[in-house]
Amino acid sequence: MSTTRRTILIASGATLATPNIAPAQEAPGVTATEIRIGSTNSLSGPASAYSVISTCLTAMFRRLNDEGGVAGRRINFTVYDDAYSPPRTLEQTRRLVEQDRVAFLFNQLGTPTNNAVHRYVNQRRVPHLFLATGADKWANPREFPWTIGWQPSYRVEAQIYAKHILETRPNARIALLYQNDDFGRDYLNGVRDVLGPRFDSMVRTATNEATDPTVDSQIVQLQASGADVLVCGVIPRFAAQAIRRVHEIGWRPMMFMTNVSVSVGAVMEPAGKERGVGLITSDYRKDQSDPAWANDPGMNEWRGFMQRFVPGGDLTDNNFTYGYGVGTTMIQVLRQCGNDFSRENVMRQAANIAPMDVATLLPGIKVQTQPNNFNVIRQMQLQRWDGSGWVRFGNVIEGANV
Amino acid sequence: MDGFAHQLIAGIATGGIYASVALALVMIYQATHHVNFAQGEMATLSTFIALTMIQAGLPYWVAFFATLVVSFIIGALVERILMRPVQNAPVLTHVGVFIGMLLIISNATGWVFGHTTKAFPTPFQSDGLLFGGLVSAHELGSTAVTLAVLILVYLFFAHTSLGLAMRAAAYNPRSARLVGIRVGWMLALGWGLAAAIGSVAGMMVAPAVFLDPNMMLGILLYAFAGALLGGIDNPAGAVGGGFAVGVLENLAGAYVVGTELKLTVALVIIIGVLVVRPSGLFGRVVFSRV
């Protein structure tokens, strides 16, 4: 018994006497030779089309390691499958943080899935960086200082549409159709951000539920309000219905469609390509099928990367240009960290990115952050459907500063 | 006024969608005294089968009738393979099987045919709208098809001995067996017919709402409401109920409570009706001797 007590005393004395020689090594997930980064993605399940983003990021870290890593350390990137199911996201995130002891989390996929870990990572003070979702709530540094998104949020997108409307039709009467959930309400908030006190006099709204069979009634109702501009924040099936119905009833508003619902195959073709002529949406990425980028240095850099590191990858899949952009941002943050990869410093650097160009983003669109503004990409360019493809027009527009 | 006419017509058009699915629910209820929660998913699967045939180059109507036959067989097989073993189990077991089927068919459909929204052709083509921009040819045509199916179902149950035998098998299996009706086959037949009617509903709905594996998820709820409103044992009542739900929902959404509460209003009205008339507006009140 006394031996035990003496041993403990000696041991604790020894601990107190040990000088603090290697602060960098005390950072979780960081050793002298390695930085561990964790992620979750839908490698199976309904959203598994997005799993190629993880393929792309893994390849980018492999390229970085081949080039010598960051500050002499190799990146060890672990991705677990959550099948797009929020409870599994929480389980796998806890596994990454508590068992694998990763330094931080990067580019986890999905809005409901990231919702499930939002509070947890902020309580544990683990950087939750550059999420693969367009919800607006990730840009809230005051309440959730450890979480940051990447792509322009739906709210920023709506702000950009509203700015364009005010510029081209200052006396517009605007009809807004949005889905009655977080996704749809971001469009309501974005338009309100820009119009401010004029919102009530300029805008008529209608909502739909994801379970509604059609939005025909809403379209008829909005047309009856006398609007000459229509903004839609709805998922692809309702987008196709809205485009068709607006055409059928002979309404010709200036029509904006959320950029999650402008896929040629899933929306424009089912709706009828000729019915959507004039429809406006927005993008921040270079479309690899656009001949304008055939000899673009940025896109050639991306093509070279794909050829060498993702030889089997589908070059028409724009998840790869997305992955390349978000991966470039992450590597920039790691380089900015110098030799200090503590969670505090990683987060500080992620919140202090000076405006930078990224190979796969449209010219003029910058990746940037400030400690009080976590909207990493806040600019977009408008594009119009010409009956067979999307044609960019006008200058890059920046969202409202709210 | 113009807006009101538009809303009314839009309501009738969506009501037609609910009515056609409600009819399939009534069919299965008449034949088995159960409500099949997987009816919508079975119809979606049938619609994908039809689309595959059309894409393979078959003319629309050939694919249409081939799908009816295939769906009939699938429905009958489901009864033989899945429902037969639990025939005498408590009703909760049946509900469990229905929900299991709903999940399995929905996920399998997505896995085989993909989750992307697809266009489905309609045999009733028109450029723009008819009657002063009120209604599309497809809406007229699909309403006509729903009414035609309704008449066929009515004639089948009221005027054929097979229909009578099916009703007897569902209502009182033991007595039916004693008078020489093969109750097992009647149940399989009922499942097959319900699946075939469901496939018609699917093929009429898909051009309007676009086809994806979750197409029927919301529709089934409204169809169920319509069937209950009209009376689940009365085909004509269920069709009327489906149209009524569509119109009520649209008019309330446009003029009374706003689009956010339109589903709520429809359901409140239905609960109100059921409290006053538990068998539905047109349902028969059934007395059982104990």
Image: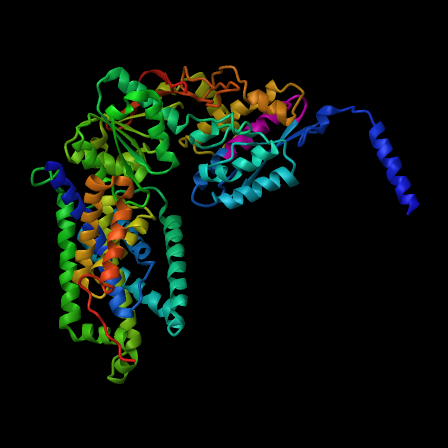
Q: Please name the residue shown 34% across and 48% down the image.
A: B213
Q: Extreme bottom residue here? A: B178
Q: Position of residue A176 (x, y in %)?
A: 27, 30
Instruction: Look at the picture and state if B200 lies above or below A240.
Output: below
Q: Please name the residue shown 38% across and 74% down the image.
A: B88
Q: Please name the residue shown 48% across and 45% down the image.
A: A85
Q: Position of residue B68 (x, y in %)?
A: 23, 59
Q: Is residue B107 left or right of residue A169?
A: right
Q: Quadrant of the C terminus of chain B?
A: bottom left
Q: Quadrant of residue B26?
A: bottom left
Instruction: Look at the picture and state if A107 lies above or below B219.
Output: above
**What kind of secondary structure does the magenta stretch mostly adopt?**
helix
Q: Which residues are magenta?
A: A54-73
Please tell me which residue lies in front, B1 or A299. Answer: B1
Q: Is residue B184 left or right of residue B150?
A: right
Q: Position of residue B10 (x, y in %)?
A: 17, 43
Q: Extreme right residue here? A: A2
Magenta span contains residue A60: yes
